[in-house]
Image (cartoon, rainbow, N blue to C red):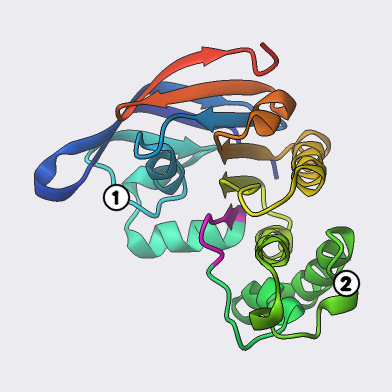
């Protein structure tokens, strides 16, 4: 299921009610890869978390298709994430004692009738990312790049309509980073998925369809990603 994104008048507050992110208008069509750049602390991760419903909003609207997640309670936002969103976090958030395949298929424990398809999807994605032969080892023995690929496989195992990625290439060498970004962009374009990547990696910017910038807590400018 393809889900367009429409954001209007978004405001996210931090401690003591201070506004830490403002988005006047931001629309993304399905099948589009958008890169979000900006200096550390500018609000890139805050934007992703707001789009995922991981942060409550102080004002405005975040709408994915017909679902206005900014108007949902915490349980409603969590249910939407389980069904529609694949999150790739900058901190991998893996269970060290579990294997790669167990980490990548965690969502299957909460998915009822979709359990087998998610487990199959996790194994297939690990193979695609070059972890297949190591997927029985505990991730505690993995390098940073291997852990990143396990985190990516976990996010994509359930075939989400939306992919939100926070610095997904940070722990990868250049060839592995380029291969991952090409895979993510291809998945978005071919599957009608909405892909938004927060990253200051120029390689990410070059492969994306659009490039937007967060400056001092404002989603401010947009330019061609290939400039």
Q: Depth check: give the residue in front, 223 or 3.
A: 223
Residue 36 in the image: state x and y as whole percent: 52, 31
- Does the magenta segment cover residue 129? no
Residue lying farthest to the left in this orientation? 16
Residue 155 in the image: state x and y as whole percent: 65, 60
Q: Which quadrant of the figure has residue 32?
A: top right
Magenta-tinted stretch: 84-92
Q: Is residue 97 left or right of residue 101?
A: left
For image coordinates 61% across by 29% down, the residue present is 34
Q: Is residue 106 above or below residue 152?
A: below
Residue under pointer 2: 132
For image coordinates 34% across by 39% down, the residue present is 41
Q: Is residue 225 above or below residue 198?
A: above
For image coordinates 41% across by 51% down, the residue present is 53
**Marks 1 and 2 in Cβ contact (< 8 Å):** no
**Residue 123 seen anywhere in this rendered image of the structure:** yes
Q: Is residue 166 above or below residue 27?
A: below
- Does the magenta segment cover residue 89? yes
Q: Which quadrant of the figure has residue 73?
A: bottom left
Residue under pointer 1: 56
Residue 128 in the image: state x and y as whole percent: 88, 59
Determine crowd level at label 1: few under 14, some 14-19, many 20+ residues with C-alpha closer than 10 A.
many
For image coordinates 74% across by 41% down, the residue present is 181
Secondary structure of the residue carrying tag 2 is: helix
């Amino acid at each position: 299921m393809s889900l367009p994104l429409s954001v209007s008048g978004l405001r996210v507050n931090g401690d003591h009610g201070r506004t830490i992110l403002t988005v006047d208008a931001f629309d993304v069509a399905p099948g589009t890869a958008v890169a979000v750049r900006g200096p550390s602390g500018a609000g890139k991760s805050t934007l992703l978390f707001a789009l995922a419903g991981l942060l409550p909003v102080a004002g405005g609207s975040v709408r994915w298709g017909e679902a206005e997640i900014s108007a949902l309670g915490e349980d409603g936002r969590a249910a939407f994430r389980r069904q529609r969103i694949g999150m790739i976090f900058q901190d991998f958030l893996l269970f060290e004692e579990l294997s790669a395949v167990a980490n990548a298929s965690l969502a299957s424990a909460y998915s009822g009738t979709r359990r087998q398809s998610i487990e199959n999807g996790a194994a297939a994605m690990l193979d695609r990312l070059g972890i297949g032969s190591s997927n029985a080892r505990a991730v505690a023995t993995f390098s940073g790049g291997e852990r990143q690929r396990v985190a990516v496989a976990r996010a994509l195992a359930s075939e989400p309509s939306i992919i939100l990625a926070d610095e997904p290439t940070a722990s990868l060498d250049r060839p592995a980073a380029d291969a991952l970004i090409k895979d993510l962009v291809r998945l978005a374009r071919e599957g009608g998925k909405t892909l938004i990547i927060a990253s200051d990696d120029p390689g990410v910017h070059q492969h994306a369809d659009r490039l937007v910038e967060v400056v001092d807590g404002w989603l401010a400018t947009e330019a061609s990603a290939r400039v």
